[in-house]
Amino acid sequence: MIRVEGYEKSYRNTVAVRGLTFDVAAGSVLGVVGPNGAGKTTTMRALAGIIPPSQGRLSVEGFDIVDDPIAAKSRLAFIPDEPQLFDVLTVWEHLEFTASVYRMTNYADDAERLLEKFELTEKRNTIAQELSRGMRQKVAICCAYLHNPVAIIFDEPLTGLDPRGIRTLKSSIRERAAAGAAVMVSSHLLDLIDDLCSHLLILHRGECLFQGTIAEAKSRMETAGTDTSLEDIFFQFTEPGVEAVSDATKE
Amino acid sequence: MFHPALWKLMRFQWRGGFRQLGRSLRTWRGLFFVGFIVAMSLYGLGSVYLASRVGSQAPQVSDVLIKMQNDFLPLGLFAFTFYTLVFSTGEATVYFTASEAAFLFPAPITRKQLLAYLLLKSLLGIAGISLFFGVFMSHQFAMAIPRWLAVVMTLSFLQLLTMNVSFLRQILEEKLSVVIRRLLGLAFSILVFVAVTQTVQSVHGHDFDAYMKVFQQSTAGKLMLAPFHVFVRALVAPDWQTFIPYAAILFAVDLALLVLAFRLDALSLEAALAISEKMTERLKMIQSKGAWQAFESKRDSSIAQRKIAQLPYWGGIGPVLWQRMTTTFRSSNRLLWVLAGAVTIAAVLVFMVARSGPDSARTVVAPFVGMGAMAYMSFLICLTLQNDIERVGYLKSLPIQPISVVIGDMIGFPILLSVIQSLFIVVLACCFTSIAPWLLCGALLTLPLNLLLFGIDKLVFYIYPTRMAKGAPGDFQNSGKQMIFMTLKMLMLGAAAFFVIIAALPGALALQSPVVAVACAGFVLVIECAALVPLLMIAYDRFDPSTTIVQ
């Protein structure tokens, strides 16, 4: 569903992402983790058609994001870390506008359902300026879900959400994946990745250190005979020296 | 061509703006704030319109205005074109708001559709701004519409030119782009050099008009300015018959640039996103720390070398004062440039305008106007510093008496500002020796004057803490509030200045003694500053950061 082949992004003398290749199949949830500056947001923005790749091919459901951006973007939803809404538009107007962007005609029922699911029904006529950050995030998610995208990309999705909002979002991601969408989630919250994702991609300084299922990552680490959490895996890959020291300390 | 969702977005934003306005008008308070800003705007527009109408009754005034437009407008347009082609990145022309970037960039909307949206929005903005210029330049009421159209087409030309240059820079290889810009810069510089040399060799004396005439009629001058005379002809056309041919040329030029922008198809979402993020960050800075600090150039670690020695504790004043002074000192480059620019431009302009008058007009008025310009710039800077609510919260957490915090926080910035201002005044005194004693005595007043200005600003903020809001369309209530607070500060400053002037007049007029005048004015200023301290202390003590109104 989402395919990245030999993706590379460079800025003059700096290589932000180097030779990245991965797939996100329909129904799977890929967790993208890495320290700051690893290239997570750059990769996601490239998949959303905002940043052109320096090299490589990125496609959504077979449509290349550079050669056929409209077809690719029609099948995709990108939710950035900071919910940026139009201050003077109401919640419902955001949905109405989104429906218009994706040329949807019968969207009202779906929009109502989404509002209900994310507890925004009472806020439908409230302007975005008057919403809390968590509410704004929920509106952004509703807009992203409205056109039933087959590929969904979340960049740090939990920021600002309350516990109930987090639960709703997590269950909605599982539902979307179960319905056949390919989902990518970037986050520094490793527990969220562990809980939600079926696959893992670890990036560090623009390079892929690991890709595979979460179970594979754990099993690879477990051969060392230690109890393995995703946090352990993360540090084993990104800071192997540091981890070795901490193991020695444990012993 | 134009995506239907983009029409919808524009419609929704207009509707949202009117909704916001309607909500403001539902309360008496909102009605008052909106009424205030409407009244002030009408007053501003009305006075400009009346001034131009009165001016048009006197033919000689009208002739002077048209002559000024003929002389300076082509030069201004040439300078803009020169700057755009050689130096500008043109990034301001491809600005999308953060919400537009978030919704539109990942959406199935083509780059050309986004460009059309951007240009339409920009054209609507230009049409609105041009209304003001249309009124201002309307010597004859019947020609208001052509004037407005001419301004719209001129501003559109500037916008489209900058946008195309930005697009070309993205398309061309960087090395090639640099070579082209250098060649253009060289060609323009040679033209300017030749035109100026011819002018200086041909004209003798101090007649500014003669210089302008020869400059414009020189071959190089004609080459430089000829394309821009079309704009002026359209702007000052006395009737429709004269206007139409020039307007047709302008329209064709704008249309060609528009077609070129679409043909280049070089709107880069990546670059537009970077610009949008930069502007969003700047807006946040404006809201929290004020416009002055938001437009501070990028700092690096080298500024850490600018050090101020730790001050003694002084009952808590020392640490607060040291922090304020160090922060100001490390961001003082722009302060220096802005004040130097204001003094130089004002003094040179007055010197040139009064060139044909008596010597006293040049040597007395010019330095005082320079000082006035500097004081005005300082006033603007103080008012755009914007008090930082988070910082006040931090200050309140310190184990220091309120009076020490208030004094330390109040005098840090004015001390540095006064040092810089005094340096400029000394330079002015060296240039204009005949009135040097007056200027040097005036330098002694800079510190109490800045303290008063800064103190009044802080007092109003402590009593009614507000922050600059992100200007939502239709939010006139907020603009009204900002305007009312500004008026309040001006009134307080005016009242304080009244007593200072009253005290200084006898010394200045009767005794003709700068020392006496400055001593009396300084005495009153010091009393006023001292009176502000307890007021500031009470206001600071009552200040509750949790109940501040963040608009």
Image (cartoon, coloured by chain):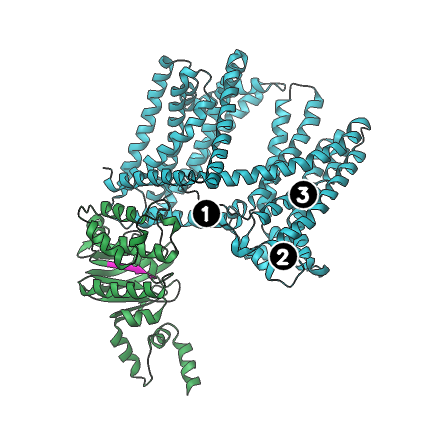
**Is residue B475 inside the magenta stretch?**
no
Disc count in the image?
A: 3
Res B335 quadrant in image: top right
Tag of residue B283? 1
Q: Tell me if B536 is positioned left or right of A214 in this view.
A: right
Which circle marks residue B452 in the picture? 3
Which residue extends farthest right? B511
Tell me the subunit letter for badge 3: B
| Marker disc for residue B323 | 2
Of the residues under marks 3 and 2, which one precedes in the sequence?
A: 2
Regarding residue B429, the answer to whether it shows in the image is: no
Q: Using the image, determine if residue B526 lies above or below residue A227.
A: above
Chain that the image shows in green: A
**Which corner quadrant holds the N terminus of chain B?**
top left
Badge 3: few (under 14), some or many (20 or more) residues near its Cα, within 10 Å?
Answer: many
Figure check: A203 above or below B195: below
Q: Secondary structure at mark 2?
A: helix
Residue at the image position 37 percent from the left and 37 percent from the top = B18
To which quarter of the image does residue B427 belong? top right
Give a yes or no on whether discs 3 and 1 share a subunit.
yes
